[in-house]
Image (cartoon, coloured by chain):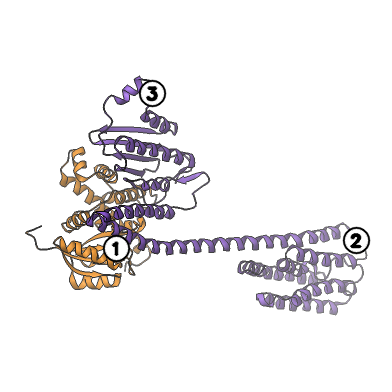
Amino acid sequence: MEEQPRVRVMVVDDHPMWRDAVAKDLDDAGFTVVATAATGTEALNRFRATRPKVVVLDLQIPAPSGVEVTATVLQEDPSARVLILSASGEQDDVLEAVKAGATGYLVKSASRAELIAAVQRVSVGDSVFTPGLAGLVLGEFRRMAQDPGPTTLPGEQLTERETEVLRMVAKGMSYKQIAERLVLSHRTVQNHVQNTLRKLQLHNRVELTRYAIEQGLDD
Amino acid sequence: MSTRAAVAVENRMFRALAVLRVVVLVNAVALIAYRNNYDHPTAGWFCVALMVGWTIYAIATYAKPIRRTVRLMVADLGIAVGLLVATPFVKGEWFSSTIPGFWIMGALLAWAVRYGWRGGLVASVVLGGTDLLIRADFDQGNYGYVFLILLGGPIVGYLVESLQQMAAERDRAEREAAAADERARLARVVHDGVLQVLALVQRRGAEIGGAAEELGRLAGEQEQALRTLIRSQDRVTAPDGPGTEDLAGALGALAHRPGVEVALPGGPVELPSAVVAELVAVVGACLDNVTRHVGPGAPAWVLVDDLGDRVAVSVRDEGDGIPEGRLAAARAEGRLGVSESIEGRIRDLGGTATLSTGSFGTEWELVVPRTEGGR
């Protein structure tokens, strides 16, 4: 990334100590922290004003929630990336944020090096998974498959290979290890993982649309 | 009982009673008009007018809880008794049915609803007794009628009391659930702050090094413990049916072991309690094995995958794997190795345990079928 322009980042956290620590770490690592925010409202206003590439977002912030901020940010600028940095690992919230389009998730106890690597990877369009998040996403696809309701479109279902890769991520294997085990390229593994997120988000959008039509909100 | 729930039940009952009052009034008036066998028709029509008037007044007055006074209750019963007493004078001594007939049910049930089984009993004794006293002769039919009144009053009263009790209990349970939710929400806010600080101390401690590193490590342990506690708390839900438990919640608690990371689906994974207990024990044994062979605090991962008709649990480490031939050697020596014990226990649950081991580490894949008591 030495040659590239510095990645513009916004840090959203209601805890000042954390906000400053994360902002400083990112700044030291060569990112440009264009804004920080303590609440959802601040986050949206400053996002509109500064247009950062990556939003490092705590889910537990004063309203609007981290999930809503994720959805709004990505609706206004689909090229932006959201990395969830969460303290308590509130599972439901994390899953909702990922469905809303967040492409990375990290717990706050992650080291500085992990944080910097995660922001770097998210900024170039890769997704950052923890085993915990992979388990949640896998569980969500399993639930969809067993749902007796409207059948899931083929485009929203995981292929066998994608399921296999997702399970391996959930078992704590790195992309490199998975690539070795399955004799695939690192890039292919990365694509499979990204596809699972893309399909989950697609399914979420389809669900929302379906809901809107049912409620007569489509006109 | 003066709780909101009790009043709500009473209101419902009085609304139903209002309908009943109209039905029995129409019935009484129709019978009187049809038979038209009164000694004193004018007095008879006066009685009918009284019944109509009182029915309208009673329905309007009973509608408001605050107007259900003792005076109203006594008047209601008094008018019914009065009409019974008037019968021999208005209809003649040898009447068979009384003037109000079934209309007295209004007063009887009002007492039962308002004062429970005791009220129902008092009103039924008063009405039944009056019915007996005014008759010149007493036959089988009268006896049956009085007997039913004596049974009906207390029974309806008792039912109303029971309904009120149940409604009050349900209200209390709902309030307690709401309070628990609120407590959990407040706790989450507090915990979130604590977790933030612990995570920060851990991170900064590791960076500063020296004595601070030890502080950071301690903070990290506490952070992990608190996070596990919150997760298991979030997962405390009423089980689906009797004898089932949430496997995800039970295995999630293993994350407090150093180095262990547990990946779970979002919701509960309900399985029979015995299966959950056995799976937790087997996964614990797998993790003990990791500690023994790879080292204390060695990283290990547990994944719970709910496939609907079966549940897969995998336990993985990144040690050197089990050396080739060691399992066979143990078997040859007649020792029951840990792996045999794991396989046997899962087989007893009707499932399969698959071991893959090599330079990449060791991985157990435990699959148990889901029989009844599933999702």
The circle on residue A58 is: 1
Q: Element at badge 3?
A: loop
Tell me whether the residue at label 2 lies in contact with that at label 3, contact meaning CB atoms closer than 8 angstroms.
no
The circle on residue B335 is: 3
Q: Are marks 2 and 3 on the same chain?
A: yes
Report whether residue B88 is seen: yes
Left or right of B66, for residue B357: left
In the displayed image of the protein, which residue is found farthest to the left? A3
The subunit letter for the residue under badge 3 reads B
Q: Residue A193 versus residue A42: which sits nearer the camera?
A: A42
Residue shown at 28%/24% (left/top)? Answer: B325
Residue type at mark 2: give it.
Answer: Phe
Q: Nearer the viewer, mark 2 or mark 1?
A: 1
Residue topped by disc 2 = B138
Residue type at mark 3: give it.
Answer: Arg
Residue type at mark 1: give it.
Answer: Asp
The subunit letter for the residue under badge 2 reads B
